[in-house]
Image (spheres, rainbow, N blue to C red):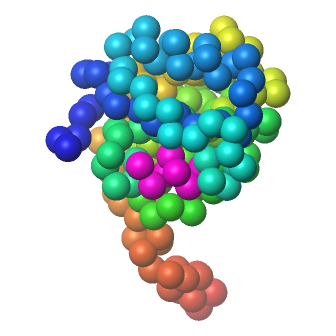
Amino acid sequence: MEPRQYGEVVMRIAIGTDEEDSLVPVITEELVRQGHDVVVLARGEEWPEVGSAVGRAVAEGVVDAGVVCCWTGTGVAIAANKVRGVRAALCADAEIARGARLWNDANVLALGVRLTSPTVAKEILVQFFATQPDPDEAARIARVSEIESADGEHVDRALG
Protein backbone atom coordinates (compact mmCIF):
# COMPACT_ATOMS: atom_id res chain seq x y z
CA MET A 1 0.00 0.00 0.00
CA GLU A 2 1.36 3.42 -0.92
CA PRO A 3 1.69 5.76 2.08
CA ARG A 4 -0.66 8.71 2.28
CA GLN A 5 -0.02 12.14 3.75
CA TYR A 6 -1.97 13.37 6.76
CA GLY A 7 -4.38 16.13 5.86
CA GLU A 8 -4.01 15.70 2.09
CA VAL A 9 -5.89 12.57 1.07
CA VAL A 10 -8.27 10.06 2.50
CA MET A 11 -6.55 7.72 4.91
CA ARG A 12 -7.29 4.20 6.00
CA ILE A 13 -7.57 4.35 9.79
CA ALA A 14 -7.81 1.42 12.20
CA ILE A 15 -9.83 1.90 15.36
CA GLY A 16 -9.90 -0.24 18.46
CA THR A 17 -11.56 -0.01 21.85
CA ASP A 18 -11.72 -2.20 24.90
CA GLU A 19 -15.33 -1.27 25.62
CA GLU A 20 -18.35 -0.04 23.73
CA ASP A 21 -18.78 3.47 25.00
CA SER A 22 -20.97 6.21 23.54
CA LEU A 23 -17.83 8.07 22.41
CA VAL A 24 -16.63 5.31 20.07
CA PRO A 25 -19.44 5.70 17.49
CA VAL A 26 -18.85 9.48 17.56
CA ILE A 27 -15.18 8.90 16.73
CA THR A 28 -16.00 6.48 13.92
CA GLU A 29 -18.68 8.78 12.46
CA GLU A 30 -16.34 11.80 12.59
CA LEU A 31 -13.57 9.94 10.77
CA VAL A 32 -16.02 8.83 8.09
CA ARG A 33 -17.36 12.40 7.85
CA GLN A 34 -13.79 13.57 7.23
CA GLY A 35 -13.69 11.13 4.32
CA HIS A 36 -11.49 8.45 5.85
CA ASP A 37 -11.86 4.71 5.41
CA VAL A 38 -12.35 3.29 8.93
CA VAL A 39 -11.50 -0.30 9.82
CA VAL A 40 -12.63 -1.56 13.23
CA LEU A 41 -9.95 -4.00 14.37
CA ALA A 42 -10.81 -4.55 18.00
CA ARG A 43 -14.03 -3.99 19.89
CA GLY A 44 -14.58 -5.15 23.45
CA GLU A 45 -11.23 -6.93 23.76
CA GLU A 46 -8.75 -6.39 26.60
CA TRP A 47 -6.77 -3.16 26.24
CA PRO A 48 -3.38 -4.86 25.60
CA GLU A 49 -4.87 -6.67 22.60
CA VAL A 50 -6.56 -3.49 21.36
CA GLY A 51 -3.33 -1.48 21.41
CA SER A 52 -1.35 -4.32 19.90
CA ALA A 53 -3.81 -5.03 17.07
CA VAL A 54 -4.06 -1.42 15.98
CA GLY A 55 -0.32 -0.86 16.45
CA ARG A 56 0.57 -3.88 14.31
CA ALA A 57 -1.80 -2.76 11.55
CA VAL A 58 -0.11 0.66 11.48
CA ALA A 59 3.44 -0.70 11.69
CA GLU A 60 2.80 -3.27 8.95
CA GLY A 61 1.27 -0.66 6.63
CA VAL A 62 -2.16 -2.28 6.52
CA VAL A 63 -3.56 1.11 7.57
CA ASP A 64 -2.17 4.63 7.51
CA ALA A 65 -2.89 5.46 11.16
CA GLY A 66 -4.81 4.26 14.17
CA VAL A 67 -7.09 5.38 16.97
CA VAL A 68 -7.22 3.42 20.22
CA CYS A 69 -9.55 3.96 23.17
CA CYS A 70 -9.91 2.73 26.71
CA TRP A 71 -11.18 4.24 29.96
CA THR A 72 -8.10 6.46 30.48
CA GLY A 73 -6.39 5.98 27.10
CA THR A 74 -3.17 5.15 28.91
CA GLY A 75 -3.29 1.36 28.64
CA VAL A 76 -3.97 1.24 24.93
CA ALA A 77 -1.24 3.85 24.33
CA ILE A 78 1.28 1.79 26.28
CA ALA A 79 0.33 -1.40 24.44
CA ALA A 80 0.44 0.27 21.01
CA ASN A 81 3.84 1.80 21.77
CA LYS A 82 5.28 -1.67 22.37
CA VAL A 83 4.93 -2.32 18.63
CA ARG A 84 8.10 -1.28 16.80
CA GLY A 85 7.43 1.73 14.58
CA VAL A 86 4.40 2.98 16.48
CA ARG A 87 4.35 6.43 18.01
CA ALA A 88 1.09 6.51 19.97
CA ALA A 89 0.10 9.74 21.69
CA LEU A 90 -2.52 10.11 24.40
CA CYS A 91 -4.27 13.37 23.57
CA ALA A 92 -6.65 15.27 25.84
CA ASP A 93 -7.32 18.21 23.56
CA ALA A 94 -6.85 19.48 20.01
CA GLU A 95 -3.62 21.37 20.70
CA ILE A 96 -1.95 18.28 22.18
CA ALA A 97 -3.12 16.30 19.13
CA ARG A 98 -1.68 18.93 16.79
CA GLY A 99 1.63 18.89 18.66
CA ALA A 100 1.76 15.10 18.67
CA ARG A 101 1.60 15.10 14.90
CA LEU A 102 3.69 18.24 14.30
CA TRP A 103 6.64 17.48 16.59
CA ASN A 104 6.42 13.72 17.17
CA ASP A 105 4.90 12.34 13.95
CA ALA A 106 2.48 10.30 16.06
CA ASN A 107 0.78 7.62 13.99
CA VAL A 108 -1.66 6.31 16.60
CA LEU A 109 -4.03 8.53 18.53
CA ALA A 110 -5.02 7.32 22.01
CA LEU A 111 -8.15 8.67 23.65
CA GLY A 112 -9.61 8.17 27.10
CA VAL A 113 -13.36 7.66 26.99
CA ARG A 114 -13.82 8.71 30.64
CA LEU A 115 -13.30 12.45 30.20
CA THR A 116 -13.33 13.09 26.44
CA SER A 117 -16.55 14.73 25.34
CA PRO A 118 -17.87 14.22 21.81
CA THR A 119 -17.09 17.85 20.95
CA VAL A 120 -13.49 17.59 22.19
CA ALA A 121 -13.05 14.22 20.46
CA LYS A 122 -14.08 15.75 17.12
CA GLU A 123 -11.67 18.67 17.64
CA ILE A 124 -8.86 16.25 18.47
CA LEU A 125 -9.57 14.13 15.39
CA VAL A 126 -9.60 17.16 13.10
CA GLN A 127 -6.23 18.42 14.38
CA PHE A 128 -4.55 15.02 14.54
CA PHE A 129 -5.46 14.04 10.99
CA ALA A 130 -5.03 17.50 9.42
CA THR A 131 -1.56 18.19 10.83
CA GLN A 132 1.58 17.10 9.05
CA PRO A 133 4.93 16.58 10.78
CA ASP A 134 7.31 19.53 10.87
CA PRO A 135 10.26 18.72 8.55
CA ASP A 136 12.56 20.40 11.07
CA GLU A 137 11.72 17.59 13.52
CA ALA A 138 12.80 14.78 11.16
CA ALA A 139 16.15 14.20 12.88
CA ARG A 140 14.54 13.96 16.33
CA ILE A 141 11.86 11.62 15.06
CA ALA A 142 14.55 9.47 13.41
CA ARG A 143 16.42 9.45 16.72
CA VAL A 144 13.39 7.86 18.39
CA SER A 145 13.55 5.05 15.81
CA GLU A 146 17.27 4.65 16.50
CA ILE A 147 16.59 4.37 20.22
CA GLU A 148 13.87 1.83 19.53
CA SER A 149 16.31 -0.26 17.46
CA ALA A 150 19.21 0.07 19.89
CA ASP A 151 17.78 -2.35 22.47
CA GLY A 152 19.16 -0.41 25.42
CA GLU A 153 22.41 0.88 23.93
CA HIS A 154 21.24 4.45 24.48
CA VAL A 155 21.04 3.76 28.21
CA ASP A 156 24.64 2.61 28.25
CA ARG A 157 25.76 5.75 26.39
CA ALA A 158 23.79 8.03 28.71
CA LEU A 159 25.27 6.44 31.82
CA GLY A 160 28.78 6.76 30.48
Q: Position of residue 146 (x, y in %)?
A: 40, 70
Q: Is residue 84 above or below residue 18?
A: below
**Point 52% across, 12% down: residue:** 29
Along the horizontal axis of the image, is 129 left or right of 78? left
**Point 20% across, 43% down: residue:** 1
**Point 44% across, 42% down: residue:** 107
**Residue 109 visible in the snapshot:** no
Q: Position of residue 97 (x, y in %)?
A: 55, 29
Quadrant assignment, res 112: top right
Residue 152 lies within the magenta run: no
* Residue stretch in magenta: 51-57
**Point 34% across, 55% down: residue:** 60
Dominant SS in magenta: helix
Along the horizontal axis of the image, is 56 left or right of 75? left
Q: Is residue 4 above or below residue 125?
A: below
Q: Residue furthest left?
A: 2
